[in-house]
Image (spheres, rainbow, N blue to C red):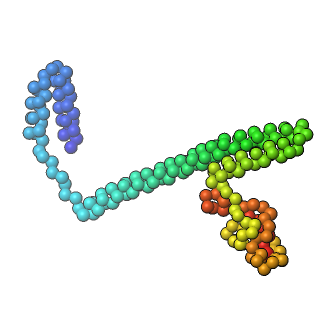
Amino acid sequence: MKKNKDNNEAALDEQLDNVAAGDEDTVVENEAAEAAEEPQEQEPQLSEEEKLAAELAEQKRAYLLLMADFDNYRKRTLRERQDLLKTATERAMSELLPVVDDVERALQAMETATDVDALREGVSLIHDKFVKYLASQGVKPIASTGEDFDPDYHEAITMFPATDEAQRGKVIDTTIKGYMIHDKVLRHAKVVVGQ
């Protein structure tokens, strides 16, 4: 086997020398002579165990490649999800900054304001702007006062004796408003329920 390798290397060196000298016909002749000299090698017959071992090794290699691909996919999707959350948070906060600016202006105006009605109107405008922002983000208040008590949306903080039979099992008062975001409860409404 080693002699074959040495002979092949010598032949290759000779071909390279001939090409360098410009003797291309010699290269073709040498290749034809080598092809005639080399006996056709036949594949050795593999035993059944060797075939199974080779097949098992191939399947192990394919499995490891698949696992590596899946691990890369998992890491990439985790990174993309984190980037998406970060981007969404940045956008939401940047849209909230004008409301913060309005609140700061209102606080400055409170220090020198003498007209309470104008100040009240300004704060009401800021509140409306903030509620519109929340609505644009999919946040909406949960209807509570006067509605039937629903534990999916309401949190009963106390029970109060109802003066009217129609108020039994209904929300009498809302102490803290509840909110939903895209049909999911963000915060339950804290309510007083008639009994």
Outermost residue toward the top in this view: 21
Residue 9 shows up from this direction: yes
Q: Is residue 71 left or right of residue 141?
A: left
Question: Considering the image in quadrants, where does the C terminus appear?
Answer: bottom right
Q: Quadrant of residue 59?
A: bottom left
Q: Quadrant of residue 103?
A: top right
Query: Residue 25 at what x, y percent from top left?
Result: 10, 25
- In the image, residue 173 sits, relative to residue 10, either above or below, namely below
**Residue at figure coordinates x 81%, y 78% from the top left:** 164
**Residue at figure coordinates x 73%, y 66% from the top left:** 144
Instruction: Give whichever of 122, 78 is nearer the camera.
Output: 122
Outermost residue toward the bottom in this view: 165
**Residue at figure coordinates x 64%, y 57% from the top left:** 181
Residue 111 shows up from this direction: no
- In the image, residue 96 sits, relative to residue 135, either above or below, namely above
Question: Considering the image in quadrants, where does the N terminus appear?
Answer: top left
Q: Is residue 140 left or right of residue 81?
A: right
Query: Residue 85 at what x, y percent from top left?
Result: 60, 48
Q: Is residue 177 left or right of residue 119?
A: left
**Residue at figure coordinates x 89%, y 39% from the top left:** 113
Instruction: Give whichever of 160, 49 is nearer the camera.
Output: 160
Query: Residue 97 at what x, y percent from top left?
Result: 71, 41
Query: Residue 49 at what x, y percent from top left?
Result: 27, 63
Q: Is residue 81 left or right of residue 47?
A: right
Q: How many marks?
A: 0
